Amino acid sequence: DGTKVVSYSADTTARVWDLKSGKQLALMSGHKSTVLWAEFSLDGKWIATASSDHTARVWDANSGVGISVFKGHTDKVYQARFSPDGSRVVTSSEDGFACVWDAASMTQLSKVLKGHESHVISIDFSPDSQHVVTSSKDGSARLWEIDQEEIKAVFKGYGDINDAQIRNHALGDVLEVKFSPDGGFLVTSSEDSRALLRRVDRSNQPIAEDVLLAPFTPARLWDVKKGVLSQEFEGMETG
């Protein structure tokens, strides 16, 4: 509802704050190492956290009480994301896997997404909750159909694109990947200081045209439809 914010810390905790007063509302304590991620579920009832202790956890957002612990990864868990329909949680890890968990039971491991050759860094659900996109230190992003545990598309080096600059994008770590709110686009950001935008059709299949290559030092706001720079945000020295 926009009235609260969640923070996470190397002190092994996550905390909920009142956005207006700055007052701490809840303390989530239970991880054994640095908390690397925290986010609210869309309905605001739950918080998911990910940690260097190889686990992800779900908490009651109002009380800070722990609800469940997701155990299954063998290395740092970078992110834990709720699906838009609230039925699943997906986690990414340094062990090279993304895991899908059943949110109803809050414990059951339902799917393991295997295919990346290095750390899975970033993850995102499609708006219909049926697909997940992952990014990795192996230089690729992958689009998955969750129920079949099937890779629908692999973006690795973007060799299918003629432009040499774009083709070389993501040969290093792919640091972040996101669906657009309408599910019509995928965007990746890479350590090469560029972001790449690709259209996705209604069946979530990537389309090779309509690609936007955007250097992002400083931060830039782009008009997606036109591919035109709208605003620059100065202040950052590096990407």
Image (tube, rainbow, N blue to C red):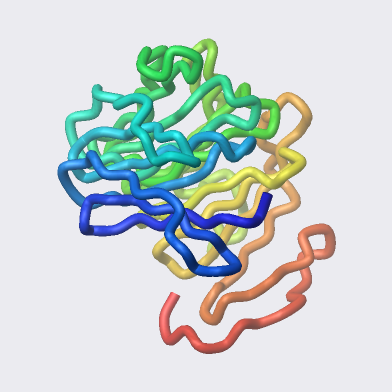
Q: Residue at x 37, y 41 (%)?
A: 49
> Horizontal placement of 83 versus 238: left or right?
right
Instruction: Say whether residue 138 is visible.
Output: no
Q: Which picture quadrant has residue 162?
A: bottom right
Looking at the image, is 199 positioned above or below residue 2?
A: above
Q: Residue at x 76, y 41 (%)?
A: 182
> Horizontal placement of 9 versus 130: left or right?
left
Position of residue 177 measured from the top left corner of the image (x, y, whole percent): 52, 48
- Of 52 and 26, the residue lying toward us: 26
Q: Quadrant of the C terminus?
A: bottom left
Position of residue 155 measured from the top left corner of the image (x, y, whole percent): 51, 41
Q: Residue at x 26, y 44 (%)?
A: 29
Position of residue 179 measured from the top left corner of the image (x, y, whole percent): 63, 43
Position of residue 152 measured from the top left corner of the image (x, y, whole percent): 56, 24
Instruction: Say whether residue 115 is visible.
Output: yes
Looking at the image, is 37 positioned above or below residue 164?
A: above
Q: Which picture quadrant has residue 3?
A: bottom right
Looking at the image, is 154 positioned above or below residue 177?
A: above
- Of 91 and 120, the residue lying toward us: 91
> Horizontal placement of 129 versus 13: left or right?
right
Q: Residue at x 69, y 54 (%)?
A: 211
